[in-house]
Image (cartoon, rainbow, N blue to C red):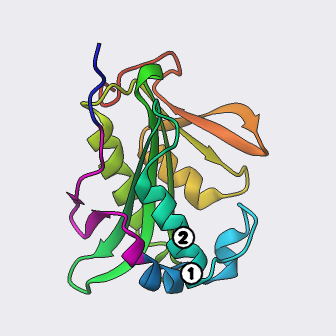
Amino acid sequence: MRRPVVRPVALATRRLDLLPLLPSHADEMSLVLADPALHAFTGGAPLSREELRARYERLSAGSPEPATVWANWVLRLRGQGRLVGTVQATIVPARGLAELAWVVGTPWQGRGFASEAARAVADWLGPLPVDLLVAHIHPDHVASAAVAARCGLRPTGRLQDGEVRWESGDGRGERLGSG
């Protein structure tokens, strides 16, 4: 049986354009992601423009695992035309699984952009062979927990690498968008 080809496409929300990630986005995104505070819950430090470009080249090339799809977008604020963050889904169609993650630059936080973008990607995943949507969130990251909840995810109480696993539905494979 042939697997469907899954690639990110441009998406639009009320205030944002979600554009498939390209290496050329690294210049502007290196400024968006430059605040060390963005790494308070995930660790590490901001990447340089060159490091971010190399990372975006790897992400744009796709997963080295044939059974895994990397779907990555930058978030462009409509009207201002500036990039404000990213959202990504790591999709394993054979397992019916997608892991969702997001980051919004510090100056644009608290305005609902992460929720808007994450919900758009969750909706995009709906018709794909994805039954379970997952996010991993640091237990103290209240803002990301709120984003996950707005996407219909619930905390499972299970920890992975110090982060709480959040899942869609009842965790038994409820179809996305069915609740």
* Nearest the eye: 106 or 101: 101
Residue stretch in magenta: 6-25
Q: At x 71% / y 60%, what residue is drawn?
A: 42
Q: At x 52% / y 82%, what residue is drawn?
A: 30
* Nearest the eye: 149 or 171: 171
Element on which disc 1 rests: helix
Magenta stretch: includes residue 151: no
On screen, residue 12 versus residue 125, left or right, reads: left
Labelled pair 1, 2 in contact (Cβ < 8 Å): yes
Quadrant assignment for the N terminus: top left
Tell me the number on the disc at residue 17: none
Residue 93 x %, y %: 40, 27
> Would you name the residue on which mark 1 appears?
50
Residue 80 x %, y %: 26, 87
Quadrant assignment for the C terminus: top left
Q: CA distance from mark 1 to mark 2?
A: 6 Å
> Would you name the residue on which mark 2 appears?
54
* Nearest the eye: 10 or 50: 50
Amino acid type of the residue that numbered disc 1 sits on in the rendered structure: Glu
Amino acid type of the residue that numbered disc 2 sits on in the rendered structure: Ala
Q: At x 67% / y 58%, what residue is drawn?
A: 141
Residue 23 x %, y %: 41, 71
Residue 79 x %, y %: 20, 83
